Image: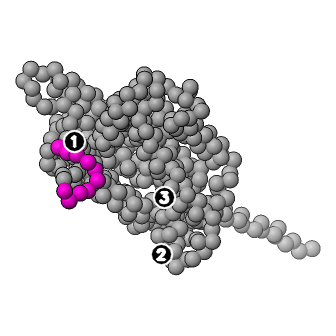
């Protein structure tokens, strides 16, 4: 009887591609090249927006020095704060154009740390004296903080999430209802709403309001302002994706029938004013050494959290433990550098102010020419103090409006 060889086993099936590998091959082809020019453009626009905003805010700071006491309202019959309006228009134009477009081109967890470059640009521009009337020196610790921030942001951009891993616009509404996002967003929004309610004029929660010059008010109001600012940036990203990329870029009119588009507009309209109003309260407490670092760090950290929970930006990044570890380390470096540089700049401002008040030579080296990290908030801080003084409120009464 003839013997036949045993049948050969079929070859093992090829391992299926993971979701992230499939996305990469779909977007980039089979060569595995993950270079995305739109990602680079988005990162570059975010850095350019931070630079323009830094110049604008230094101009506004110069206005606070040279145009103090002048009215903001333009007039043909008397002097008004022209420099302030120039800086305000530059800053606003940069934020509503470059920043919004950048948010649509790159993940928010990568763009958020780049916005921290504004503090670096302000410090370096003030050191170089490129804005007339603003000339400062930087200590070694401040230069070291700048290096840490730049290295951290560079690593975040190189190892952070990429655009091909972001969820589709039509799926964003589903992610709003996820338990993980709601578990973060509900307590964060409740914290902001609580402090808005406490600080409202004639609030029924007035008895819970801390003293107008207390550290508690300074820290809590600045943290709430940072959270509101982070929500504002998230809604701006959704708006950018809907209007700029879907409608204008692809002619997709379905975005106008999607409730997420209108929710983003409503979110911007609510969160942006709340951010500035809470920041005004925080700076009015006179504790800018706490406010500026905490405000900036809260925006960066909350935007990274929101990018992971709402836009699912870390799903594919988590498959590479090396990239995830580098990104988290770089983010911590950036946050630490921003906090240190902000506190050092504010400390120099305070020391300069004390020297100018108590110096025998009468030289003016006080707060007007130092603290570029807080330059964005000088108009708010000074107007807050004037408002507090004009109202002549008791120690535990309400602070600036």
Q: Mark 3 points at which residue?
A: 236
Q: Does the magenta stretch include residue 73?
A: yes
Q: How crowded is mark 2: few (under 14 residues within 10 Å), some or many (20 or more)?
A: few
Residue at image x 17%, y 24%? 357
| Disc 3 versus disc 1: nearer the observer | 1
| Residue 118 appears in view | yes
Element marked by disc 1: loop
Residue at image x 16%, y 20%? 358
- Say above or below: 198 vs 245: above
Residue at image x 25%, y 36%? 371
Left or right: 104 with respect to 190?
A: left
Name, please, the residue furthest toward the front: 77
Q: Which colour scheme is used?
A: one colour
| Relative depth, front residue between 350 and 193 | 193
**Secondary structure mainly formed by the magenta segment:** loop
Measured as percent of width and height from the top left, residue 171 is found at: 64, 63
Element marked by disc 3: helix
- Tag count: 3
Q: Answer yes or no: do the residues labelled 3 and 2 have beta carbons within 8 Å? A: no
| Relative depth, front residue between 81 and 239 | 81
Name, please, the residue furthest toward the bottom: 251
Please give the label number shown on residue 248. 2
Q: Mark 1 points at which residue?
A: 68
Q: Distance between the residues labelled 3 and 2?
A: 16 Å
Measured as percent of width and height from the top left, residue 69 is found at: 23, 42
Magenta segment boundaries in residue numbering:
66-77
Q: Does the magenta stretch include residue 273?
A: no
Quadrant of the drawing holding the N terminus: bottom right
Measured as percent of width and height from the top left, residue 351 is found at: 23, 25
């Amino acid at each position: 009887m003839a013997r036949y060889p045993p049948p050969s086993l079929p070859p093992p099936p090829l391992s299926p591609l993971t979701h992230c590998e499939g996305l990469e091959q779909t977007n980039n082809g089979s060569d595995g090249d993950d270079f995305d020019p739109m990602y680079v453009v988005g990162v570059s626009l975010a850095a350019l927006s931070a630079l323009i905003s830094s110049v604008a805010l230094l101009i506004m700071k110069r206005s606070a020095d040279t145009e103090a006491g002048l009215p903001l309202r333009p007039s043909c019959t008397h002097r008004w704060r022209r420099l302030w309006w120039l800086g305000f228009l530059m800053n606003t134009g940069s934020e509503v154009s470059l920043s919004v477009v950048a948010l649509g081109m790159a993940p928010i967890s990568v763009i958020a740390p780049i916005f921290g470059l504004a503090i670096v640009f302000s410090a370096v521009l003030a050191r170089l004296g490129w804005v007339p009337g603003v000339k400062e020196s930087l200590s070694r610790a401040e230069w070291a903080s700048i290096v840490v921030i730049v290295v951290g942001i560079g690593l975040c951009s190189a190892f952070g999430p990429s655009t091909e891993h972001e969820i589709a616009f039509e799926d964003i509404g589903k992610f709003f209802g996820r338990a993980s996002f709601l578990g973060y967003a509900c307590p964060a929004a409740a914290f902001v709403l609580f402090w808005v309610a406490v600080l409202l004029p004639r609030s029924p929660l007035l008895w819970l309001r801390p003293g107008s010059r207390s550290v508690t008010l300074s820290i809590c109001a600045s943290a709430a302002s940072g959270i509101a600012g982070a929500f504002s940036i998230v809604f701006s990203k959704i708006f950018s994706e809907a209007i700029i990329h879907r409608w204008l870029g692809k002619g997709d009119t379905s975005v106008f029938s999607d409730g997420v588009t209108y929710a983003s507009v409503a979110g911007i309209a609510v969160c942006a004013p709340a951010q500035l109003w809470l920041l005004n309260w925080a700076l009015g407490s006179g504790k800018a050494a706490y406010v500026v670092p905490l405000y900036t760090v809260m925006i960066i950290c909350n935007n990274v959290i929101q990018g992971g929970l709402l836009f699912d930006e870390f799903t594919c990044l988590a498959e590479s433990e090396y990239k995830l570890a580098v990104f988290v380390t770089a983010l911590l470096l950036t946050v630490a550098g921003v906090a240190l540089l902000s506190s050092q700049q504010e400390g120099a401002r305070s020391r300069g102010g004390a020297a100018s008040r108590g110096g025998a030579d009468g030289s003016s080296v006080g707060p007007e020419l130092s603290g570029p990290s807080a330059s964005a908030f000088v108009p708010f801080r000074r107007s807050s103090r004037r408002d507090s003084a004009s109202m002549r409120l008791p120690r535990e009464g309400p602070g600036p409006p």
